[in-house]
């Protein structure tokens, strides 16, 4: 029997840990990388998202046989990238921008083992209902907007604002499980075996 390689999760997101647990994957260590996540001038959302996931996976220190998994989720309205809001005022501005509109939720996954890296980009579409100022105020009071791309999360109180999605639910949460499992298997991590 061969021993499975050690898996390092390069993310501090509790949502990503929960999603991995859904498919029986428990990382051996968690090492969130510290990189500059500012978009470059004129950078498009999809290119930005893939670049960040790739830079994250490259920044995590690992032994040659260890597998590193990183991901990044970006919310975009048109060409505009909505990152994690700095404060409640920015979160409110994001919500007003998304109110009654479709947006893209892009999640890139990067897996590295040694000098080889595998990536996958998953793009989903989400429609947010028109929001009243009272709804925005009440939502901001929950503090659920903190640390979330675009200032909202589908698995939290903002779920009541989302009548329609097209794409991968788990990618919208922060880690597309189908694609992640395939990348881990490609890197030699036995997702379906102990």
Image (spheres, grey):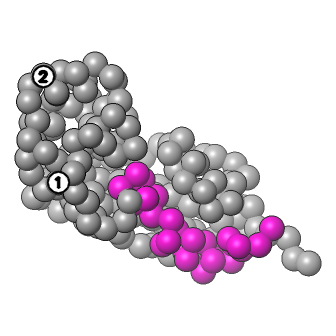
Q: Is residue 9 visible?
A: yes
Q: Residue 125's spot in the image, x, y percent?
A: 22, 62
Number of marks present in the image shown: 2
Give the numbered dot on residue 148: none
Q: Residue 174's spot in the image, x, y percent?
A: 42, 53
Q: Is residue 16 above or below residue 53?
A: above
Quick one: quadrant of the C terminus? bottom right
Q: Residue at x 60, y 57 (%)?
A: 22
Disc 2 or 1, which lies upstream in sequence? 1
Q: Residue at x 13, y 56 (%)?
A: 102
Q: Residue at x 45, y 64 (%)?
A: 176
Q: Residue 191's spot in the image, x, y percent?
A: 68, 71
Q: Is residue 55 visible?
A: no
Compared across the picture, whether 59 is left or right of 90 comes to right
Front residue of 172/87: it is: 172
Front residue of 46/94: it is: 94
Q: Image quadrant of residue 46? A: bottom left
Q: Residue 135's spot in the image, x, y percent?
A: 16, 27
Q: Image quadrant of residue 104? A: bottom left
Quick one: quadrant of the N terminus? bottom right
Compared across the picture, whether 177 is left or right of 160 comes to right
Q: Regarding mark 2 in the picture, which secondary structure is present there? A: helix
Q: Is residue 101 above or below residue 171?
A: above
**Per the image, is 23 magenta?**
no
Q: Which residue is mark 1?
A: 127
Front residue of 16/46: it is: 16
Q: Which residues are magenta?
A: 170-194
Distance of label 2 from label 1 (alpha carbons): 19 Å
Q: Which residue is mark 2?
A: 134
Query: How many other residues sit within 10 Å of disc 1, few (<14), some (14-19) or many (≥20)?
Result: some
Q: Regarding mark 1 in the picture, which secondary structure is present there? A: strand
**Per the image, is 177 magenta?**
yes
């Amino acid at each position: 029997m061969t021993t499975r390689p050690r898996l390092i999760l390069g993310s501090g997101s509790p949502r990503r840990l929960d999603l991995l647990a859904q498919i029986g994957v428990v990382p051996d260590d968690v090492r969130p990388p510290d990189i500059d996540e500012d978009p470059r001038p004129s950078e498009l959302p999809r290119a930005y998202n893939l670049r960040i996931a790739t830079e994250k996976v490259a920044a995590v220190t690992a032994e040659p046989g260890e597998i590193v998994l990183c991901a990044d989720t970006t919310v975009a309205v048109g060409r505009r990238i909505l990152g994690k809001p700095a404060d409640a005022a920015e979160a409110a501005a994001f919500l007003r921008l998304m109110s009654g509109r479709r947006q893209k939720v892009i999640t890139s996954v990067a897996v590295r083992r040694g000098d080889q890296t595998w990536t996958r980009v998953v793009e989903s579409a989400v429609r947010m209902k028109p929001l009243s100022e009272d709804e925005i105020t009440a939502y901001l009071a929950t503090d659920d907007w903190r640390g979330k791309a675009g200032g909202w999360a589908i698995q939290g109180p903002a779920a009541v604002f989302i009548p329609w999605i097209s794409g991968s639910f788990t990618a919208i949460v922060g880690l597309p499980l189908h694609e992640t499992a395939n990348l881990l298997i490609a890197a030699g991590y036995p997702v379906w075996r102990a």
